[in-house]
Amino acid sequence: MRRIVLTYGLIAGAVLAAMMAITAPFQDQIGFDRAVVIGYTTMVLAFLMVFFGVKSYRDNVLGGTVGFGRALGAGLGITAVATVCYAAAWEIVSHTLLPDFMEKYATYAVEKVRASGASAAAIAARAQEMAQFQEMYRNPLVNVALTFLEPLPVGILLTLVTAGVLSRKRRA
């Protein structure tokens, strides 16, 4: 199982890292709203490797049957590997290609509140919140943890669906 988890997890991680590296130089042209759509679409496509990895594990290692628990374990392993790749890629990309990312994001978040017609108090509160977030994000452990949490829910959801779809009991 370890070989399948690493193989499919690294493929998914490579897709996530490559798309991040490809789109990072175009951050200003893409914008934050479209970047979210592109990012999560890429995550869904990358995490399809969970399905193919669990299917390969079921068909080639377990003789065509896998229980929900084993399928879930393999899928979570693939998700973990891909998510670690994503977090590592973000650390490299954010420090080399996007060193001012957090400042730009904070400005965007405050401007979005301002454009919605919010009160001066709401705008000031959002600005304060973003200043605190920027300070927190400077801590490398917090930065990595938050980055790790971005793709994780997508991977877990696709793992649960995959385990449900591909799990089969042995027929007596």
Image (cartoon, rainbow, N blue to C red):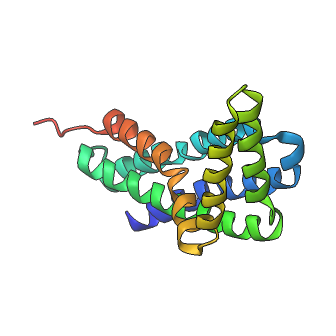
Q: Is residue 117 left or right of residue 73?
A: right
Q: Is residue 57 left or right of residue 44?
A: left
| Residue occupying image coordinates x 61% and y 40% | 45
| Residue occupying image coordinates x 42% and y 40% | 157
Q: Is any atom of residue 62 visible in this view?
A: yes
| Residue occupying image coordinates x 37% and y 63% | 1
Q: Is residue 166 above or below residue 62?
A: above
Q: Nearer the viewer, residue 17 or 95?
A: 95
Horizontal and vertical percent for residue 3?
Answer: 45, 66
**Residue extending farthest top:** 117
Q: Is residue 88 above or below residue 66?
A: below
Horizontal and vertical percent for residue 155?
Answer: 47, 47
Q: Is residue 6 above or below residue 110?
A: below
Horizontal and vertical percent for residue 83?
Answer: 53, 59
Q: Nearer the viewer, residue 50 or 158?
A: 158
**Residue extending farthest left:** 172
Q: Nearer the viewer, residue 1 or 138?
A: 138
Q: Nearer the viewer, residue 122 or 171?
A: 122
Q: Is any atom of residue 7 visible in this view?
A: no
| Residue occupying image coordinates x 64% and y 38% | 121
Horizontal and vertical percent for residue 142?
Answer: 53, 67
The count of marks equals 0
Q: Is residue 19 left or right of residue 10?
A: right
Q: Quadrant of residue 4?
A: bottom left
Q: Which image quarter holds the C terminus?
A: top left
